[in-house]
Image (cartoon, grey):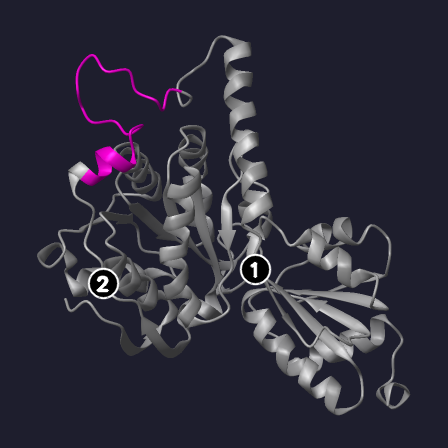
Amino acid sequence: MENKEEIKLLKGNEAIAHAAIRYGVDGYFGYPITPQSEVLETLEALMPWETTGMVVLQAESEVAAINMVYGGASSGKAVMTSSSSPGVSLKQEGISYIAAGELPALIVNVMRGGPGLGTIQPSQADYFQAVKGGGHGDYHLIVLAPASVQEMADFVGLGFDLAFKYRTPAMILADGVIGQMMEKVVLPPARPRRTDEEIVALCPWAARGKFGRKQRNVSTTLELDPQAMEKNNIRLQETYRRIEAGEVRFEEYMTEDADYLIVAFGCMARICRKAIEDARACGLKVGLLRPITLWPFPTEAIKALSGQVRGILVAELNAGQMIDDVRLAVEGRTPVCHFGRTGGIVPNPQEVLNALCKDFNVEMEDAK
């Protein structure tokens, strides 16, 4: 593989696979489920075990896959998995264990509708599961929400870099639209996988298989001493505070003079950009704030804009999940309303604009 950028036309799921190989990922462990199966299928087609030595394994189940990630992460390897909503539900216990062990790993969730088996159509209804922590205990994931195929590729490297920096699992939370759509992608230059010597130097906490050596990742075991368990939890919370202080990411669009604000992520942010352009053409000043990190959430940015605008519309492909965090950020300064579709229905920009005008009693001619 040549060490240079490369431009390709790819699906979002395919971009994940290409970026993983170029990042120098050591291992991928997954299980097929729509609408993310192309991640595994692309890796199998590219056969990186012959070029980079990357392990690609279809596990017997989602539970097996996440526990393989757990083992690989414990040894300091860059390992990842991908799935879709019901499959990620099955991985939750393993994700909680990885978080407790303070281990870096990357999880990709290409969301589909629910609850239950639901639909194979796109959704954003795993927000609670990802941002609030679907497993047990007081832990967080760094959650990145791509809005383009390019970001699907870019967030592989970013997710791993953040995971290793803070020794915590990271998740790429994409909706089925972004996973299945095709766009031009600039793939990053390839970089070699780390050698065992580099892993030992960079990850002194990693399990190396040496008898008699005390391992660092002991917080995953049953802890009978409440004080020791509390100490582990306090250390985790200190890490999360550092992440909140340094890793908030978001994008603003036409917010400088906005009278109304839309908050949306993923494919809904793309739809809302067009709704905003249509609103501006009719004289209605609307802006967009797109959270890129769903956790840590851009609370302060939304709080600052809430003092400027007359109302905030939260647009999601769910019944109302991110709206809770927006309301907490606003602290009652301005009205917050919700627009959402469920069941795999993706709205058009006019529906979003109609909802904004209805919720805030605005007519286009009044805005001119």
**In the visual, does 316 lie left or right of 104?**
right
Q: Classify mark 1: helix, strand or loop.
A: loop
Q: Nearer the viewer, residue 258 or 242?
A: 242
Distance from disc 1 to disc 2, alpha carbons, whole Å, reads 31 Å
Is 264 located above or below residue 283 in the figure?
above
Classified by dominant secondary structure, the portion drawn in magenta counts as: loop
Disc 1 target residue: 124
What is the crowding at mark 2: few (fewer than 14 residues within 10 Å), some, or many (at least 20)? Answer: many
1 and 2 marks in contact (CB < 8 Å): no
Mark linked to residue 15: none
Q: Is residue 135 above or below residue 272?
A: above
User: Within the magenta stretch, is there residue 202?
Assistant: yes
Q: Residue at x 47, y 66 (%)?
A: 176
Q: Position of residue 300 (x, y in %)?
A: 71, 53
For the C terminus, the image quarter is bottom right
Identify the image quadrant of residue 217: top left
- Residue occupying image coordinates x 27% and y 65%: 18
Please, what is the three-letter code of the amino acid marked with disc 1? Gln
**Helix, strand or loop at disc 2?**
loop
Type of amino acid under label 2: Ala
| Front-most of residues 13 and 158 | 158
In the image, farthest residue toward the top: 225
- Provide the residue span drawn in magenta: 198-218
Name the quadrant containing residue 260. Answer: bottom right
Residue drawn 34% across the image and 44% down it? 62
The residue depicted at 42 percent of the width and 21 percent of the height is 219
* Label annotation for residue 190: 2
Residue 259 rendering spot, x and y as whole percentages: 82, 74
Q: For this view, does 171 lie left or right of residue 199?
A: right
Residue 136 location in percent, x, y? Answer: 53, 31
